[in-house]
Amino acid sequence: MGLYKYIRAAWKRPKEGLGTLWRERLIAWRREPTTIRIDHPTRLDRARSVGYKAKQGYVVVRQRVIRGGHTRPRPSGGRRSKRFGTTLNLHQNYQYVAEVRAQKKYDNLVVINSYWVAEDGRYRWYEVILVDPSHPVIKSDKKINWVCAAENKSRVFQAKTSAGQKMRSS
């Protein structure tokens, strides 16, 4: 078996496959900021499959999204029950929310894709892959220089990433 097959097998069941490392990571990640830039992807096999390359111009960001809480608070003023609006159907999945928040934080970069890293009872973590469209290495690479076009600047807000396409189809 190759290296990526072993990595993929360990991430099938991360609590068993990663052992105590899984718990230690979650404890450390809860103390970190919501959006944090990291040097290397945590899941190398998944990052490579969604478009990551270990070259200049690529940025990996770990984004934390809080789970639940999609009901609005009950309004204090008087109104008929039809206009209470307490239940809110959130059509955006957590992964798409993570991509949008990463794009807002790094507005000079372009979101390529993202993948799930971890979750507990309160949070979900995703790693978002971003590319710098003004970097000379990205401009000269024929496989990725499509992000340099102006229409791809806001592709995450148009739901053109894989998480956005899943959200749009439902």
Image (cartoon, rainbow, N blue to C red):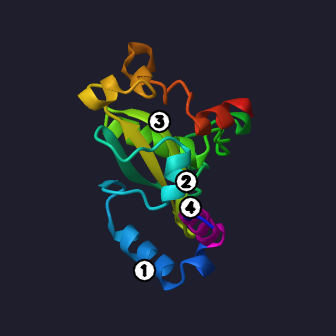
Q: Secondary structure at mark 3?
A: strand
Amino acid type at mark 4: Tyr
48 or 158, nearer to the observer: 48
Q: Secondary structure at mark 2?
A: helix
Q: Mark 2 and mark 3: span between their CA atoms?
A: 13 Å
Q: Secondary structure at mark 1?
A: helix
User: Which residue appears at 61% of the width and 44% of the height?
Assistant: 93
Verify CB contact (< 8 Å) between mark 2 and mark 3: no
Query: Please, what is the dominant secondary structure of the magenta stretch?
Result: helix
Task: Work out whether 109 lies above or below 58.
Answer: above
Q: Is residue 48 magenta?
A: no
| Earlier-in-chain disc, 4 versus 2 | 4
What's the magenta region? Answer: 3-13
**Residue 24 appears left or right of 120:** left
Verify CB contact (< 8 Å) between mark 4 and mark 1: no
| Earlier-in-chain disc, 3 versus 4 | 4
Is residue 16 visible in the rendered image? The answer is: yes
State the residue position of label 2.
46
Residue farthest to the top, as pictured: 150
Q: Mark 4 and mark 2: span between their CA atoms?
A: 9 Å
Verify CB contact (< 8 Å) between mark 3 and mark 1: no
Task: Work out whether 106 lies above or below 68.
Answer: above
User: Which residue appears at 48% of the width and 25% of the height?
Assistant: 155
For discs 2 and 1, the disc positioned in front in the rendered view? 2
Amino acid type at mark 1: Glu
State the residue position of label 4.
4
Q: Mark 3 and mark 4: span between their CA atoms?
A: 21 Å
State the residue position of label 3.
112
The answer to which image quadrant residue 107 occupies is top left
For discs 3 and 4, the disc positioned in front in the rendered view? 4
User: Which residue appears at 60% of the width and 78% of the height?
Assistant: 17
State the residue position of label 1.
24
